[in-house]
Image: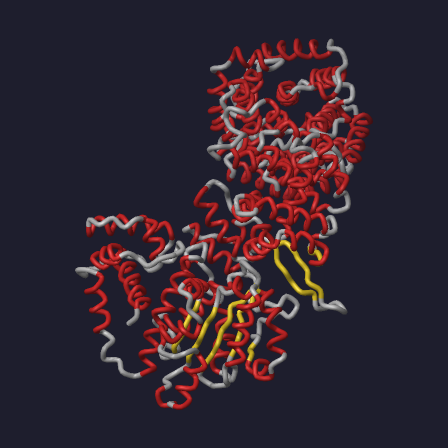
Amino acid sequence: MNTNELLSQLRKFVLIKSGLRNIDPAHCKTISELVFKETKNYVSETTVKRFFGFAQTLHKFSLFTLNSLSQYVGYTDWESFCKDKKSQTEDINDVWSDLKIRCQAVTDVSLIAKKNNSGVPFEATANRSFLYSDFDYFLKNDYQFTTISAQPGQGKSILLAHLVEHFFYSENAVYKKDIVLLINSGTINDIIQNNLSLKDWFLKEFKFAGVSELITYFKKNPKECKGRFVLIIDGIDLFLSKSKYFKIFTDFLFSLRECDFVKIVLGLRVNNWVNMQPAISGSAFLTKSWYKGLFFDDDKDTNVPLLNKEEILYTLTRIEGKPIKGDDIHPDLIKQFRTPFWLQIYYKLKQENNTIRLNNYLLCLELINYFLENRVFLSKNSTEKIFILKEISNTVSKGNLLTHRVPKERILNSITSYAEAYQELIYSGVIIEEKRLTTSIPTEIIRFLNDDIYTYFLFLQLTEKFNFKPDKAFFEEILNIYSGQQELRKLMLNWSIRFCINRNEIQALKQIFKLPFSNEEKNSAFDFICNVALFELEKPDSNFNGQTIDIHFIDIMVMGRIISKNYKEAIKKISEKVFNEDIQIMLHVIECGICVIDMDKNALNENMNTLKRHSKKLQELFPINPYDLILYLSNTINNKPNNIKTLDEKIVKLCEKVDKSDPHKNDDITSAEIIVYRFVIIVLFTNKNYEECANFLSAILKKYPNLFYLRSSIFSSLLIIFTAQTCIKLEKFKQAQRLIQYLDTLLNASSTYFTPYIKCAYILAKANFLNHTKNYDKALGEINKGLAMAGENEIQIIEIAFRLLKIDVLKRSKDTENINQNIKDLLKFVQVNKLSLPDFANVNSIDFDHTFNILKSYKSGM
């Protein structure tokens, strides 16, 4: 056995001794500690990494290292280990068996290197078994060559490792008698570093001066040929990019004579495969002997399809250590993970930050940022690389995500000027070279690895244009330049949100809601702001942290959703970590509002206990102490009596104060006012004090005359809805009708910001109006539409209101069976969800109050 074979054997025994089937870099420290514990000899973690191929080996291993590792596996020293292994092969006297042992030593090392470089634990990678039958067909039929052709990151090398294990190495491998020789870039590097030619190396390792001589020998001695000789060459793309090595390689292919026992498998990147095709088509022998495979895509020049959903879930399940289903992953992540490379990036990112979730779109951007940070910004020639990438993104037609590629000739000056940087970008997979063969003259084109890298560099240039200061003009640029490209504009907004929160430029995000972005964009942006805020809050070195969160964040939180999972989680977690006492108190008040709408009694009591300790602060921060309002609503939810007289007096004083204020602009309204005004209106409505409710709404409009025309916050729409409901209660039906018609126009305008809660509340007001004006059939139509929307968005308080209203409407029809069924459905709904029937859920007419009280008492007695 030669040295490589012996080293391979030693690696195997070290792994067995350490209890490892495979190894990754994290295991090297453990092995170092185990060797020291066993032998009292210290072999550093770095040396262990070199020994297992994780770090480049520029010199031979020291005798101390080899002796220590030999002692670890039970031998006195390296020499005794070598003697024992050589004695095991002395009885082998046939050429085929000797060749097999020699090839196995090289293949073992190459296979370990592939597993170690897989980016995720090898056992977690999908085995792509649908390709096995194709490979088996190649082995069994009269083809001598095949290619595994793929773009960087498509899992070409991992696929080859799976093929070797499945067909030649596993316990149930069908071709164990065959010889497989797997050669990686590391092997080629060793040959070059040792100043050997391929022929010299082959002779030294296998006693044949090249594959041609091996073929000649077994043709002359057919009885000694006991199977197939399968040569698999992978990881040599960097060498093939150099003309001298490319010629050596093609000459090697031409030199092989036809034979039925030699099979050659080449793992190539697409650009090298394209460059090799003319050489193949120019040779009758190669054309006849080459097997493309059933899965070859002639348009993309690859036979390695992207991962399917099941393969992605298989890998993620093993990475996460728990079952992962399709619903657990954001759809855009599924799309991104179809390229296996992004699963590797996710695995690395997860090891550094375990807080980000698979159902969060932010992960898409974090993967892109992590990848570019390591492959571009922190790499050699980073300035030149960034320049090239910005030039490519500039040259791509703006917004053309379907064909985000450029002719190579258009950036040829940059390629020539920064040749090394360009080649590194190609090799690292940031950009990809392709040939467009469908045109009259085949042209070379360049594209980004995926769309998000393209948008990243578009966004980078936008930030540079505005000196990295996001302001109104910054967001207007996004609004106007990408006005006809909704998908791209959404991506640019997402990058902007991440950028602003990452730099703690929270105030700038208000522009998204003030400018005429679409309602869908605003809702999506609001959810994404919550997601990014939570992610940044968990980072140890974030600019957005417990110390820096201020009133600007509160302002954004009161602009948007009253209820959503992202919103609730953001408010709760940030209130637990924020340092500023005033901000923390305001967040707890907001959280109480969420609890009231959710009818979450336990969470409401918890937050009220916190607020109770800050009575003086609450009085200073808000126009009226919100605790009194929250206590009233809490008692209502818990069916407890209320001392409404004292609270009424406080509300009347607030109303008078607001009414006497000078007119203000919409921009002057504070978050503290919005929070309190919401609570006051709900309290007055719940107490059936509709006259005072109308007075209070009128006072708000007197202070802020243009508030109904505010488009950047849902508060204006909420005020109009409550005004309409109040008018219905006061039987001012014409005024209510005008408000509902105005709401209809308002909520159908593309630039109005509203949420599912607001939409449901509007439909409820409309249905209530139709019920009061005896349009029962139309009212039922609106109720059923609203019930579907409330159920879909899990807005339980609104769903209760719709169910109550439906019972009221059905009472007019005298359909007793239908009425009883809907009463049963309502009671079952509140029982299953462990809810109550609070007064503010009943928007019906006075004559329904008796029915409502019966339902409440029936519920409480269940």
Residue 665 in the image, given as x and y percentages of width and height = 75, 19
Query: Which residue appears at 44% of the width and 74% of the height?
Result: 231
| 842 relative position to 225: left or right | right
Q: Is residue 611 above or below residue 712?
A: above
Using the image as rendered, state which of residue 209 and residue 573 is in the foreground: 209
Is residue 579 shown to the viewer in this render? yes
| 251 relative position to 390: left or right | left
Identify the image's colour scheme: rainbow, by chain, secondary structure or one colour.
Answer: secondary structure
Using the image as rendered, state which of residue 125 and residue 213 is in the foreground: 213
Residue 627 in the image, given as x and y percentages of width and height = 54, 17
Is residue 335 shown to the viewer in this render? no
- Seen as rendered, the residue at the extreme front is 195
Residue 646, by quadrant, is top right
Using the image as rendered, state which of residue 505 and residue 610 is in the foreground: 505
Rendered-image quadrant of the N terminus = bottom left
- Seen as rendered, the residue at the extreme left is 76
Residue 379 in the image, given as x and y percentages of width and height = 53, 46
Using the image as rendered, state which of residue 380 and residue 125 is in the foreground: 380
Query: Which residue appears at 20% of the width and 69% of the height?
Result: 84
Count all numbered tags in the image, as a single digit.
0
Query: Which residue appears at 51% of the width and 71% of the height?
Result: 266
Residue 699 in the image, given as x and y percentages of width and height = 73, 15
Residue 120, by quadrant, is bottom left
| 214 relative position to 506: left or right | left
